[in-house]
Structure formats: C-alpha cells, structure tokens
Image (cartoon, rainbow, N blue to C red):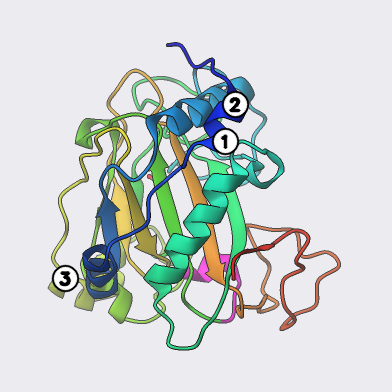
C-alpha cells in the first residue's frame, strides 16, 4: 500500500467536514452517530502511514503501552505535536462542541489521541489486542468529574463486521454511570445491569472509506474479533468539555503528576481545541 504523500499538502486541505443538525440529533438521542464521508481519504492515508511507521505493518511492533486488554493494541499518536494532524484534531473539537450541545457556551478540550489497531484473532501476537471488545462503558476510566466526553473513532481503511467493528447499545447513555468492566468478574455488562436488555443493539457498523463513528463516554459498546489477516486500524480522538476536571482517581489515560484534583487540566498538555 502506498502511504507516502506530501504531509504539508494534506495539512492544508480541509481535513474533515462539520456535523449536520440531523447527526447531532441522532447522537443526542442514541448516544452515538455514524458520520459518513466525514474525513478526507488523504488524511486517512497520512494517519495510516504514521501508524505503520510507529507500530509496523503488523500493528504489533511497538512496545506494550502497559494496559493489558484484548480490545486493541494502543499507541499514543501525538497528533497535537504533528502539524499535519493538529488541524484535524482542532476541527474535531468544533464538531465535538456541536455534539455536546451544552446550553452554556462551554469550550472543548483535547484529552487524548491514539492508534488502536485490533490485531488479527487468528495470529499469535506480541502485544495483547487480538480479542473481542466486551461491551463496556468508557466514562469511569477517564477520571473526570463530569460527562460530555466522547470518542471520535476513525477507521483508517474501509471495514465491515468481519474486521471486528463496533456496535452500540442504543440510548444506553441515559442509564447513568455503569462502573468499570474490570469489576464485573468476567460477567457481561448486560447481566450486571439487566436494564441494558431494554436497549436495542445497533448493527455492527460498516465503515466505507471516510466514515467514522462518534460515541458518548456513557454509551455501552463492544466489538467482535478481527477475522481479517491484517490489523483493523483505527485512530481515536477524545475531546472533553473544557470545564471537566480531574476527579483525583488513578487515571488510565494520562499522567497526573503535577496536577491537582478538581483543578482544570493544564492547557499545555490538554489545550482548548474549540473555544
Ligand atoms: O476498538 C474497539 O474495538 C473498541 C474501542 C472502544 O472501546 C472505544 O473506543 O471506547
């Protein structure tokens, strides 16, 4: 695959579009939304080239990031420090602000971005990340004091269910905070919280090139194994409302050294991306 290109030229192009009112309404009602043709294929090629450069063609040649789970093999992408990717993150911030739909005029803060290839289930892998994604809710792992955060889940190629794409429990974002999956003793979240059985499950998403999904950190989601013989490449960008603060819990997603609980996230590491 040719993933070489003029990075500066890509940075100058409009990296993604804005959400429509209908997409915002779907997100608010169901807790997730598929944004078709959201992102420029040139940007996807650039991201894939960067991911392969760091993680290898097998998506498994990076050092372990230290959290052992079967969902995917994660690797920080440092998109903020990359002049060709930062415009995309900033535009995602504007989209996140529209999707948050807060009545107060609250800005959006960058929280994290990383590559998350789901490795092929039939292969023995060095890192973990070649299993299914059990149904779970993200919110509690992020150690923030309020809701509003979301994940822009950006597949770097076209993928369907055989690649282990996600499905979502519709309207599960209305059921409050549902804990951390590691506390369920191996049980399915729908057995721990039977009220989730009242939520219909979306189909496993079919992503054409350029399509993405966005899910609220309160929305329960999961994915099957990757049955392809190659990684299911994804780039994840996580914005938070700018007024969210660290709640003092041990965070999985950031290093809290130098930070104080219930004080704003430091702007140098977690900049405002949409005012
Ligand atoms: O990539 C996956 O299979 C799961 C992703 C996920 O859990 C998330 O984005 O919150």
Residue ID at (71%, 83%)? 262
Rendering coords of residue 186 (x, y %): 38, 57
Mark 1 or mark 3, earlier in chain: 1
Q: Which label sits in the foreground, 2 or 3?
A: 2
| The C terminus sits in image quarter | bottom right
Q: Residues within 10 Å of mark 1 (few under 14, many from 20)?
A: some
- Whether pointer 2 and pointer 1 mark residues with C-beta atoms closer than 8 Å, the reply is yes
Badge 3 marks a residue whose secondary structure is helix
- Left or right placement of residue 34 versus residue 45 in this view: left
Q: Nearer the viewer, mark 1 or mark 3?
A: 1
Name the spot of residue 190 as percent of width and height, x first.
Answer: 25, 67
Q: Would the CB of label 1 be found within 8 Å of ligand 1? A: no
Callout 2: few (<14), some (14-19), or many (20+) C-alpha neighbours within 10 Å? Answer: some
> From where the camera sits, is residue 138 visible?
no
Which residue is most to the top?
A: 1
Secondary structure of the residue carrying numbered label 1: helix
The span shown in magenta is 138-145
The residue under label 3 is: 197
Q: Residue at x 24, y 35 (%)?
A: 208
Residue 142 locus on image (x, y percent): 57, 66
Q: CA distance from mark 2 to mark 1?
A: 6 Å
Going from the N terminus, do you reach mark 2 or mark 3 first?
Answer: 2
Give the quarter of the image for residue 18.
Answer: bottom left
Residue 11, label in figure: 1
Residue 255 lies in quadrant: bottom right
Pointer 3 residue Cβ closer than 8 Å to ligand 1: no
Identify which residue, 180 or 23, lies in the foreground. 23
Q: Which mark is residue 217?
A: none
Left or right: where does residue 20 sit relative to residue 13? left
Q: Quadrant of the N terminus?
A: top left
Q: CA distance from mark 2 to mark 3?
A: 46 Å
Residue 7, disc: 2
């Amino acid at each position: 695959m040719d993933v070489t290109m003029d990075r500066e030229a890509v940075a100058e192009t409009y990296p993604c579009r804005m959400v429509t009112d209908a997409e915002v309404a779907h997100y608010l009602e169901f807790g997730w939304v598929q944004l078709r043709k959201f992102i420029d294929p040139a940007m996807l090629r650039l991201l894939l080239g960067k991911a392969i450069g760091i993680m290898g063609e097998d998506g498994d040649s990076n050092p372990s990031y230290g959290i052992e789970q079967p969902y995917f093999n994660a690797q920080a992408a440092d998109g903020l420090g990359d002049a060709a990717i930062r415009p995309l993150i900033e535009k995602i911030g504007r989209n996140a602000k529209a999707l948050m739909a807060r009545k107060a005029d609250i800005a959006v803060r960058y929280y994290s971005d990383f590559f998350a290839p789901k490795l092929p289930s039939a292969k023995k892998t060095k890192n973990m990340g070649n299993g299914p994604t059990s149904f779970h809710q993200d919110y509690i792992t992020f150690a923030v004091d309020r809701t509003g955060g979301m994940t822009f889940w950006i597949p770097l190629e076209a993928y369907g269910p055989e690649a282990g794409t996600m499905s979502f429990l519709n309207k599960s974002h209305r059921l409050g905070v549902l804990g951390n999956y590691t506390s369920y003793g191996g049980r399915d979240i729908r057995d721990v919280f039977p009220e989730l059985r009242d939520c219909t499950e979306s189909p496993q998403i079919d992503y054409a090139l350029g399509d993405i999904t966005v899910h609220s950190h309160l929305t329960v989601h999961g994915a099957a194994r990757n049955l392809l013989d190659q990684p299911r490449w994804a780039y994840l960008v996580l914005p938070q409302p700018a007024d969210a603060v660290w709640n003092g819990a041990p965070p999985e997603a950031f290093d809290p050294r130098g930070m104080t609980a219930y004080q704003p996230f430091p702007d140098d590491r977690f900049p405002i991306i949409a005012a």
